[in-house]
Image (spheres, rainbow, N blue to C red):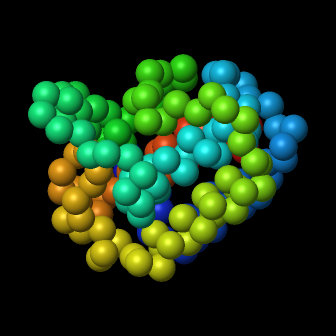
Amino acid sequence: MPLPNIFSKEVSQEVINRINMLTPETQAAWGKMNVAQMLAHCNVTYDFVYTNKYPRPTGLKKLLIKLFAKKIVVSEKPYPKNGRTANEFLVAAQQDFLREKERLIKHINQVVTEGEHAFEGRESHAFGSLNKTEWSNMFYKHLDHHLSQFGV
């Protein structure tokens, strides 16, 4: 079954509404991150798109990511609870809840403003060129997974 299209204003607004339901005290149903760390973790996906904060994978690492991780990340199949994550996504330090929340909402709005046409064939940080559906799946599935983790 297709995932909701994050490029749709209705879908993105629904996700933002869920984010706005979070508070600094919201507890996770599973996992090790607190809510502020989760928001920072979700921002990493957008940092890959909009910053040069993380070096691009090369060589064997790039090949392994394309062969094994890409399908998991861009498919419609949900992530399992407590699944393994890439090192770049690990957030152990304390984070500023409001800052990370505002950054995440800004990123979602930026994706919607650019629109799906801007993502069709766009090069991803580690997976090579993705189509607009793969981008939408990656953005939406990751957000939905973690918002569900925190009960919203």
Q: Which residue, as the protein is rendered here, is positioned at the far right?
A: 25
Q: Give the residue at x 67% y 38%.
A: 37
Q: Give the residue at x 82% y 38%.
A: 26
Q: Give the residue at x 13% y 28%.
A: 60
Find residue 102 and report its image quarter.
bottom right
Where does the C terminus fall, quadrant-wise?
Answer: top right
Give the image location of residue 98, x and y in percent.
Answer: 78, 55
In the displayed structure image, the side of residue 51 where residue 9 appears, left or right: right
Of the pair 107 and 7, the residue shown nearer to us: 107
Q: With respect to residue 121, does 81 lie above or below? A: above
In the displayed structure image, the side of residue 74 where residue 104 appears, left or right: right
In the displayed structure image, the side of residue 57 where residue 36 appears, left or right: right
Find residue 34 and report its image quarter.
top right
Q: Which residue, as the protein is rendered here, is positioned at the far bottom?
A: 113
Q: Is residue 4 visible?
A: yes
Of the pair 127 and 75, the residue shown nearer to us: 127
Q: With respect to residue 60, does 115 lie above or below? A: below
Q: With respect to residue 140, does 89 lie above or below? A: above
Give the image location of residue 67, x and y in percent.
Answer: 16, 31
Q: Give the residue at x 72% y 25%.
A: 29
Q: Is residue 71 visible?
A: no
